[in-house]
Image (tube, rainbow, N blue to C red):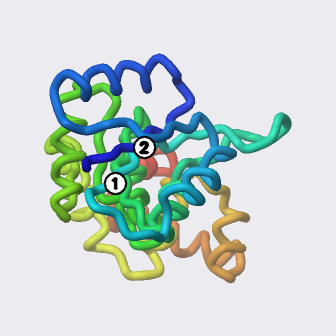
Amino acid sequence: MKDLILIDDHALLRKGIAAYLAEHSDWRIVAEAEDMGGIPDIIAQFGGRERDGVLIAVVDIQLKGDGPNALASNGYKAVRMLLDAGIRSVVFSSHDTSACIEKAMSEDVGARGFVSKVSDEQMLLSAIDTVADGRTFIQPDLAAGLLERRGVFSVLSRREQQTARLIAEGLTNEEIADALGIKVTTLENYLSVIYEKLGCADRAELMERLR
């Protein structure tokens, strides 16, 4: 069996994907969720058990929280939770910058594929099939940008790379300093070196370079 889980807060999009796969593939939708609140039920039903076929989840990065007053929360956590339960994921999102791709595909998150929502359903199907075969998949034109970004990081030291990645995620200087366990003044010194190495005039130019 080739079973698929759809996790996205847009019901029409889930319906469109399901219709396309029903017509063009032998994948079947066995579960859906529109927010983080649906993840535990999916894991309870499908996680951590032997299965005859394959099971893949398609997950959007941006998911709502699990309560009426909860703030929107990233699907990165959902991907990690699913992977810990033995379910591999393909991220399907409009948040398709190199920074988002790198985070999604990192060891901490663990996505096995990444496709932009501006692409077509065939690209998504290719990603799903590739991940089902035990390989990873990044949409080709997005992969080119990711390689360029990694080339940028190659000139930075390990601590400078950590700093740059946190900047790309939109954290403030104070938040970055706290995350790295350093003083803000020390962080500012790192930033000066990063700007010089990458030829950036300021933080805004650096963030554009890291997209």
Residue at position x 41%, y 57% from top? 104
Residue drawn at 34 percent across, 26 percent down: 17
**Which kind of residue does numbered mark 1 sit on?**
Leu
- Vertical side of 30 occupied by 23: above or below: above
Query: Toward the viewer: 167 or 68?
Result: 68
Residue 71, image quadrant? top right
Of callouts 2 and 1, the N-terminal one: 2
Mark 1 neighbour class, 10 Å CA radius: few under 14, some 14 to 19, many 20 or more: many
Compared with 57, 199 (above or below) is below
Q: Which residue is mark 2?
A: 5
At 60% from the left edge and 69% from the top edge, which residue is drawn? 188
**Do callouts 2 and 1 mark residues in contact (Cβ within 8 Å)?**
yes
From the viewer's side, name the closer residue of 191 and 85: 85
Residue 211 location (% of width, % of height): 38, 46
Q: What is the CA distance from the residue labelled 2 to the residue labelled 1?
A: 8 Å
Question: Number of labelled discs?
Answer: 2
SS category of the residue bearing label 1: strand
In front: 65, or 56?
A: 56
Q: From this view, report whether residue 169 is shown above or below residue 118.
A: below
Left-right relation of 93 to 134: right
Kind of residue indicated by mark 2: Ile
Res 58 → quadrant: top left
Looking at the rendered structure, the secondary structure element under dot 2 is: strand
Measured as percent of width and height from the top left, residue 4 is found at 36, 44
Work out whether residue 129 can be spotted.
yes
- Viewer-nearest residue: 121 or 41: 41
Q: Which mark is residue 55?
A: 1
